[in-house]
Image: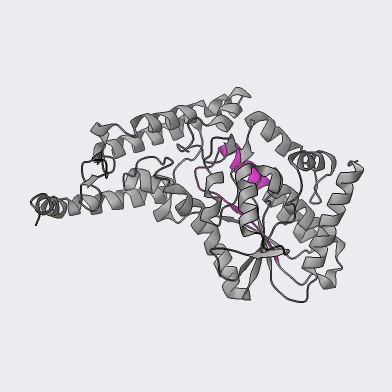
Amino acid sequence: MLDPQLEARIAAIRADLRDEYQQPHEKPWIVGFSGGKDSTVVAHLVFETLLEIAPDERRRKVHIVANDTLVESPLVVGHIQKVLAEIADAARAWRLPVETKITRPAVDQTFWVNLIGRGYPPPNRMFRWCTERMKILPTSRYVKEQVAASGEVILLLGVRRGESATRSQSVRRYDNGERLNRHNDLPGCMVYRPILELSTDDVWEFLASVPPPWGGTHQALIQLYRDAGGGECPVVTSKDDVPSCGTTSSRFGCWTCTVVEKDRSLAGFVEAGFREFEPLLEFRDWLVAIRNDPHRRSAQRRDGRYTVAPNGTFIPGPFTFETRREILERLLDLERQVGHNLISRDEIQRIYEIWSEDLTKEPARAGAAARQAVGG
C-alpha cells in the first residue's frame, strides 16, 4: 500500500499520461529506459496506462528504448535485457502497441575501436569523447528514424526536479511551463517528463509497493542498487545531459569509465560478492594509470600536428602502436579470465583496419610534421 499522499500524486501522473496518450494525433511515444529506478517507474506507468485504455483506442505506438554502449557493467546490461524481454513478452500477450529496442554505437565509434584502434587516451573531464559517440548518437539516430516515419515524436524521460542541483537547474532552464517541451537538439521531438515532481523516496516506495504490470516484482532492481550503492547513467540524447554521465556520484554505467576517479558501483558489486568482476576494476584502473604516461603516447596528433597549449604545455598525441597492441592483448586475456564477451570480432577487425591505415599514412605524416617544424 502506498502512502495516501503518494497515491494521490501517482494517480495524477496516471491521469496526465492517459490524457496525453488520448490526444487526437498519431505521434508515437519513445520511453528512454536506462534500467534504473526513475526510467523503470516511467515504463511501469506507461504500460499501466495502455492496459487501462480500451484496445481500439491504443492507436499510438510506444517505443521503450535502452542504450548499450557495449562496455556496460555486465550485471546492469543483463538486467536491462531481462526487463525489456519481460516487457516485450507481456506486450505481445496483451496485444499492446509496444516495441522494445536497445541502441548501440556503430562499430567504428565504439570504446575499443577509438581507444585501441585510434589510440585515443581514456576519457577524462577535459576530453570526454565517449558520451556522444556511444550514448547520444545511437539513441538520437533511433529518435530521428521515428521522426522521419511519423513527422513528430514524444520522448518520455524519467527526469526528476529533485534528482540533483544540476538537474533542477537544467529543468528550470528548459521548462516552458507546458506538459511538452521541445527538444533542444532533435527537431520534431517533444520531451515529456511525467515524474518530474516525485522525490527519490517516492520512487523507492512506489517500486517496493507496486508490482510491475508486465509481471514479477521490482525486487531485482532494488537489489541491484543495494549491491552497487549507485544510480544509473541515464539515457542521453543531448549534450545538456552529459554531466549526469561520468559524475563523481556512484552510478551504473560503463565499467571502463575513467571520467570518475573511482568506479564505486562496480566496486560495490565486487564487495557484494561478485568477485568475478574484480579483474574489470583492475583493468580500468590500469587504463587510468597509463593515460598520461609520456612513453606510451605519440608526439604527433593523428593528423600529424604537434599541439602546445596556450600556457606552453605540450599535449601528446594518441597511444603508441605498442601500447595499443598491449591493451588489446590484455583485454583478450581479461575476456578469457572473466568469461564475458568484452570486445566483438567486428571491433577487432575494425581495429586492425585502422592500424593498417595508420601505418600506411606514417611516411606522409612524417613529411607533414617536418614541413610544419620548419614553417613550410
**Residue at the spot x=10%, y=54% of the render?**
375
* Closest to the observer, 114 or 6: 6
Q: Position of residue 106 (x, y in %)?
A: 45, 56
Which quarter of the figure has residue 282?
A: top left
Image quarter in which the C terminus is found: bottom left
Q: Position of residue 234 (x, y in %)?
A: 60, 48
* Closest to the observer, 359 or 178: 178
Q: Position of residue 141 (x, y in %)?
A: 52, 63
Q: How is the image coloured?
A: one colour
Q: Position of residue 113 (x, y in %)?
A: 38, 48
Segment colored magenta: 62-83
Image quarter in which the N terminus is found: top right
Q: How many marks?
A: 0
Q: Is 133 included in the stretch rendered in magenta?
A: no
Which quarter of the figure has residue 94?
A: bottom right
In this rendering, the answer to whether 200 lies above or below 178 is above
Whether residue 164 is visible, yes or no, is yes
**Residue at the spot x=82%, y=66% of the render?**
19
**Residue at the spot x=64%, y=46% of the render?**
80
In this rendering, the answer to whether 47 lies above or below 278 is below
Q: Is residue 3 left or right of residue 125?
A: right
* Closest to the observer, 224 or 189: 189
Which quarter of the figure has residue 287?
A: top left
Whether residue 50 is visible, yes or no, is no
